[in-house]
Image (cartoon, helix red, strand yellow):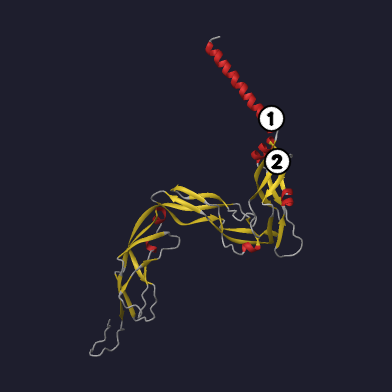
Amino acid sequence: MPQSTRNISLILRATGATIFAVVLWGVVSLSDQFDTVLDVPVSVETQADRSLVHPLPASIKVRVRASGWSLLKMHATGRMECLLRPVVVGGTGERVIGFNRRELLASIRTDIPDAQQLSVTPDTLTMVLGPTGQKTVPLSPEVTIALRKGFLVIGDVRVQPDSVLLVGSRRALEDITRWPTAALALDDVHRPVTRTVAVSDTLRGIVASTMRRAELYADVQEVAERLLSDVPVVNRASTRDTTLHLGIYPSHVDVLLRGGARDLSRIDPAAIRAYVQILAGADTLGIAYPHLVLPPGVNASVVSIRPARVRYLFRREIAAGSSVPGSGERRRIAR
């Protein structure tokens, strides 16, 4: 056998022996007893007519003694919890219930039969239980949308359904006016968004939503501009004196709009009006600034109105047949 082959064979044998020794040491070591501290989740099972008024710690620290194999399994599966089952007998108000060290240790649930719970931190827990109530509030989308350059969100971000039924502590429900979805962040968005989102569980154990998921919608369109020419200028104020005639100069303006390309293409120019608010006897400056009111459902912003201001003039019309001092004619006079 060549020397190089014999060397490789010796190395492999030595490596195999080392691995076997390590495995054997590990097996023997894991059979020993060890102490360790674990974060154990806290769960509460309440009666149907009772709810937590204040939150409890999400977890407690438990010192556990068990074999190395059991602890390894415990870390791998995570099947360990502190399950509290408070009982309230009689009464309709709030009740304070405490759990001492012994009761907390007795509430530890695990699938490791040889595990011993030695201590717990904190060694007492106090909870307040109150009447359960229900309330329906708007569902609010918690979303951050980072748009691709040249795009924008048209209108509001919506969720469907737009409201949610909450069940939990009657006292906590009094202060809740809206309920959020789980936070969502979207990047480089350049098309309409339809996404399933989770409903928040921020008040775990106190208030719960009867709905777990909702549909989120955002209309994202490419930015565009559209010029509408010869838009009529109309006075929105009423004139009681019917002998007065209002003249607006110029009577038409040009309007530049900015918004989503799809929405702008659907605008009917004949439905667009520029408005002024001129009241006879109160407005005497002779200058007004028109503004635009877009039809319902049109999401766009006004970039400019040209000209930005218009002149106006009230004229009183005298009907034909009235006498005018110093004249033998019957004529209509405007002043």
Residue plotted at (58% across, 19% down):
12
Asked which secondary structure carries label 1, the reply is helix
Q: Residue lying farthest right?
A: 89
The correct choice, above or below, for 271 with respect to 211 in the image is: below
Gap in angstroms between the C-alphas marked 2 and 1: 17 Å
Residue plotted at (70% across, 50% down):
83
Residue plotted at (65% across, 55% down):
56
Residue plotted at (39% across, 76% down):
238
Where is residue 295 drawn, in percent x and y? 43, 63
Residue 163: mark in rendering: none
Which image quarter is the N terminus in? top right
Whether residue 218 is visible here, answered yes or no, is yes
Which kind of residue does numbered mark 2 sit on?
A: Arg
Q: Which residue is mark 2?
A: 65
Where is residue 256 drawn, in percent x and y? 34, 60
Q: Is residue 90 left or right of residue 56?
A: right
Residue 28: mark in rendering: 1
Where is residue 3 drawn, in percent x and y? 53, 11
